[in-house]
Image (spheres, rainbow, N blue to C red):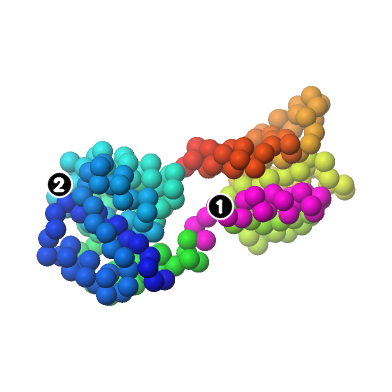
Amino acid sequence: MFNKKILLVRNEQTFLVNAIKNALDAAKFIVDEAAYSLADLSAKAKEANLILLYTDNELEEHRDAMVYLKDLSMEDNIVMMVIGNKDAFDFVHQYIPKEDVAYEIERPLDMADLVQKAQIVTDDEYEFQRRKSILIVDDDLTFLQMIREWLKDTYRVGMANSGTQAVAWLATNKADLVLLDYDMPVLDGPKVLEMLKSESFSSSTPVMFLTGKNDKESVTNVIALKPADYLLKTISKDKLLSTLDAFFKARK
């Protein structure tokens, strides 16, 4: 918890801004400040564990900053909190989706509440839970473990070595994406995909095939099931990570 970095973004250094900074300092945060300028934000924002936006009546003059913060939210998944009123929150959400703002804090401020919320969203477990969840389904345990190792530093990763295990896992856990082997015994990938689409808890979960089969018949059969993508097992780690990153950014 200690030494977490907060970037306090404000237009001017007011009495209340200084009070916020002092309260966060007292809670052992490292607090830096930035104006609503691209130069200031680009120099400081990526180092922060939390970006705290202090809004004011001149917020509409900071559209360029909001575009930058939107891109930062999408690309680096940095946690944000906003201090202001309903009009300010509505303006911010024109750029940053509501679900990407951890807390909206209305004035007058309760400093103890503000500090507590900052502590919650900078906790390591909170950061972990914000990660996208991916379920890997493959009967090859060696391959299963390898893909998990590739993904575990960026995503929450679940594993299943059969279609039956995958359905059981998804019945009690949420996945943002399933990476599904095509060629498995008993229930092959296409049959598993059909099962997932038929269940209420997994019908909307996107599925990518990660497979060694690239013959025309296999590809044709699978395309009809409308998977999110069809990736070959020969894919490199960097290519897989960049493909997943692009996929989640496009959905956002």
Query: Which residue is nearer to you in this view: 200 or 192?
Result: 192
Question: Which residue is at a point 59% across and 43% down the rendered structure image?
Answer: 241
Residue type, numbered disc 1 = Thr
Q: Tell whether label 2 touches label 1 (CB within 8 Å).
A: no
Q: Quadrant of the N terminus?
A: bottom left
Can you name the residue that lies furthest to the top here?
216
Q: Position of residue 83 (x, y in %)?
A: 25, 59
Question: Which residue is at a point 30% across and 57% down the rendered structure image?
Answer: 7
Q: Position of residue 135 (x, y in %)?
A: 67, 52
Whether residue 137 sits left or right of residue 108 in the image: it is right
The mark total stands at 2
Q: Which residues are magenta?
A: 128-154
Q: Is residue 108 above or below residue 8?
A: below
Q: Position of residue 222 (x, y in %)?
A: 74, 33
Asked if residue 140 is among those painted magenta in the image, a careful observer would answer yes
Whether residue 167 sits left or right of residue 42 in the image: it is right
Q: Secondary structure at mark 1?
A: loop
Mark carried by residue 58: 2
Residue picked out by circle 1: 154
Few, some or many residues within 10 Å of mark 2 (<14, 14–19, 20+)? few
Instruction: Give whichever of discs 1 and 2 has the lower sequence position.
Output: 2
Question: Which residue is at a point 37% across and 68% down the rendered structure image?
Answer: 3
Question: Which residue is at a point 40% across and 47% down the rendered structure image?
Answer: 73
